[in-house]
Image: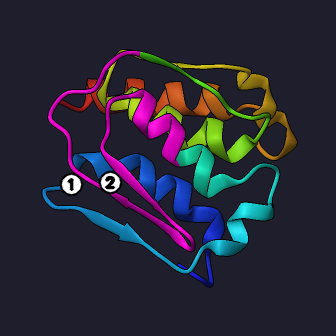
Amino acid sequence: MRDIPDTAQTLAAVAPFASSPTRIRGIASARVKETDRVHATCVELDRLGVRVEEHEDGMTIHPVEKMRPAVIQTYNDHRMAMAFSLIGLRFDGVTIENPSCVSKTFPNFFEVLEDLRTQGQSNR
């Protein structure tokens, strides 16, 4: 993911739902963004009970059948808030700390996400 490191957190957020481990590499540059996104993502996945291995240039995320409820720290990083909110679409125990940090790039992100979630439920 060297060419698109800003999307690594999103991949990491959906990886626990995969059927096999997901190895994300080539994102060492993500360590010098709003926060060390590699480390922060690993810490927050672990907080949810996801087995994750941190590497110098990325991480390996293992599938999980059940997560534990957690308040996800955003580190005031809009990408942390947006990526981890996706886990909340599949698991009710996710609370995003400082959700207003998304105002940097997508102020109405949570309203749009809620609309999509509601539309998805009505299409079932």
Displayed quadrant of residue 122? top left
Near-viewer residue (106 or 85): 85
Q: Position of residue 37 (x, y in %)?
A: 66, 53
Could you tell whether 16 is left or right of 107 in the image? left
Q: Does 48 appear above or below 8?
A: above
Label 1 Cα neighbours within 10 Å, binned few <14 / some 14-19 / many ≥20? few
Give the residue displayed 48% in from the left and 76% down from the top.
Answer: 25
Using the numbered discs, state the Cα–Cα distance from disc 2 to disc 1 in whole angstroms.
5 Å
Could you tell whether 86 is left or right of 56 in the image? left
Label tally: 2
Give the residue displayed 21% in from the left and 48% down from the top.
Answer: 63
Give the residue type at disc 1. Ala
Near-viewer residue (120 or 54): 54
Q: Are marks 2 and 1 in contact (CB under 8 Å)?
A: yes
| Residue 52: assigned label | none
Give the residue displayed 74% in from the left and 21% down from the top.
Answer: 98
Quadrant, the C terminus: top left
Residue 118 magenta: no
Label 2 Cα neighbours within 10 Å, binned few <14 / some 14-19 / many ≥20? many
What residue did someone put label 2 on?
15
Q: Secondary structure at mark 1?
A: loop
What residue did someone put label 1 on?
18
Give the residue type at disc 2. Ala
Magenta highlight range: 42-69
